[in-house]
Image: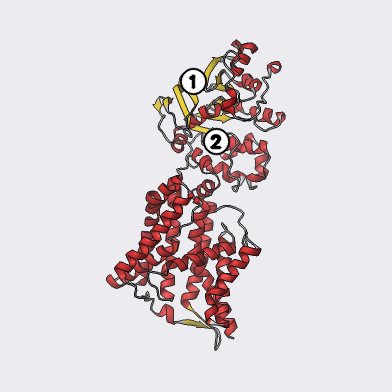
Amino acid sequence: MNWLNAVLQGLLLGGLYALFACGLSLMFGVMRIVNLAHGDFAVLAAFLAYSTVSGTPLGILGATIVVIPVFALLGYLTQRTLIQRALQTGPLSTLLVTFGLSIIIQNLLLQGYSADTRALPAGSLVSASLKLSGQVSISYLALLTFGLAVVVLLGLQAFLSRTALGRMLRATADDREAATLVGADSRHLYGVATAIAFATVALAGLLFAMRSSFDPSIGPTRLLFAFEAVVIGGLGSLWGTLLGGMVLGLAQTIGAQLDPALTLLAGHVIFLAVLAFRPQGLIPARSTA
Amino acid sequence: MTTLLEVAGLTVHHGQLAAVSDVDLSVAEGEIVAVIGANGAGKSTLLGAVAGAHRASAGTVTFAGRDVTRLPAHRRVAAGICLVPEGRRLFPSLTVEENLLTGRYRGRNGPWTLPRVVDLFPWMAQRRRQVSAQLSGGEQQAVAIGRALVANPRLLLLDELSLGLAPVVVRRIYEVLPEIIASGTSILLVEQDVGQALRVADRVHCLLEGRGVLAGRPADLSVADVERAYFGLRSSPALAGEAGPAPDAEPVEGGSR
């Protein structure tokens, strides 16, 4: 029964990893850049929500509703001011700029909040769980996280395939210059892609902060998991990202079942195995977005 | 006829090289103007500068009475200039229909709609859900033209329509030009196939090493004039440096007129 529990927890954990990963995947798909500060922005969102909950009468739901749009805006501005400039000087500069952002965010958070671990209070959502049997129960938070991940991925897919803006994002990803010739302002579209990525990573950061404690230094690990989920699933494929997240989550919980020390190692081993034997990922992308 | 496009003293640099220098050219409403010239003569660069893809280092581009020299490419679409780029440049992961729809993103309203483009190229009706990477060269060219048309440009720029296509396909593509002109769109086209250009154009400009060397109505130009201008027989053969190692394989189809 413990094994069944581990499998269920692992699959649901995959939803969280997919949420972390889809923004990374979107930014890579549209702009061909890897945002090394992706995990740190998730942590920043968690701290922002933490301050909102403790400093204002807004509850956790209110804080979520505030933080996500703020992050979308932050994403748009970050792209238009920092990343766009770096893009124009070459692919290496975007790595340097986002790496720099990662360090700056970590240190500012350390300065402002100290290295103490915090938790985002989510009330009964965390403690209450759905009892499937005597030994198998699933927390409502894990279910909610997985459900939100599916909703976000469905929404992203609908946006990319059905709206004019989404279509132009894919067109720009295919051929930026040709997209300019049909009237696409690539800087604006890149801003939109980054805004979406930031909104999703903020949601992921908040959900993560509700289920486990966090401190300013955990961003890079989140980035690594997101990156692994994207690569396992197949770069550029949204549903591949969910599958990749689930495989990674499963590997980690089953590894932990064998020996708690194996948790992270098991995930990394799966990642390396996919890179070695199926480098295109489990579900290779048909399109670049 | 009123002037739609006026290019005056246009110079465009690629790095140190002046790909286009001091070129004057105009297109009137309802006119087809063709630019001919050898490889590396600066034809595509000229078209790119009109579309905004290349920056002018000197000179002006005036469109419908408005100076658009500094207007970025993505805003020229809304102004009414659309380029069908060399090599088609479709969005390979998008379907035929999605490629056409991208033309509507910042396009103007007018007679050209998706259904009308499908009327023009009936095969699209069956295959609108097909990913454009799977199309043949001629089909891709048709989609590229359709993508520009649904933006309802006042001036359509066509860059090397015939490149890499079988003659029968080229003929079919060129057959649609009269309908485009009839809808009120003017055309500026670049063509390596001189015979084709002289057949369809109201006026022809010949570029040599980035400079305009000959201009006129096809009927007024002799084959010898065109050949001399095209190959620059009176100037030094410095063309090789500009065109790179690419072999010069464009025949002047004198006999086909």
Callouts 2 and 1 in the same chain: yes
Observer able to see residue A257: yes
Q: In x, y percent, where is residue B98?
A: 57, 46
Q: What residue would you read off at disc 2?
A: B148
Please give the name of the residue rendered at 38% of the width and 72% of the height, measured from the top-left corner.
A215
Q: How many residues crowd mark 2 within 10 Å: few (<14), some (14–19), many (20+)?
A: many
Bin the neighbour count of mark 1 within 10 Å (Cα to Cα): few under 14, some 14-19, many 20 and up.
some
Residue B249 is situated, as x and y percent measured from the top left of the image, at 67, 26
Specify whether A205 is left or right of A288.
left
In the rendered structure, find residue B25 and report the number of the disc placed on it: 1
Rendered location of residue A245, percent (x, y): 55, 68
Q: How is the image coloured?
A: secondary structure
Inspect the image, locate mark 2, and give the three-letter code of the amino acid beneath it. Answer: Ala
Question: Which of A265/B174 is in front?
Answer: A265
B105 shown above or below A246: above
For marks 2 and 1, the one nearer the N-term is 1
Residue at left offset 45%, top offset 43%: A185
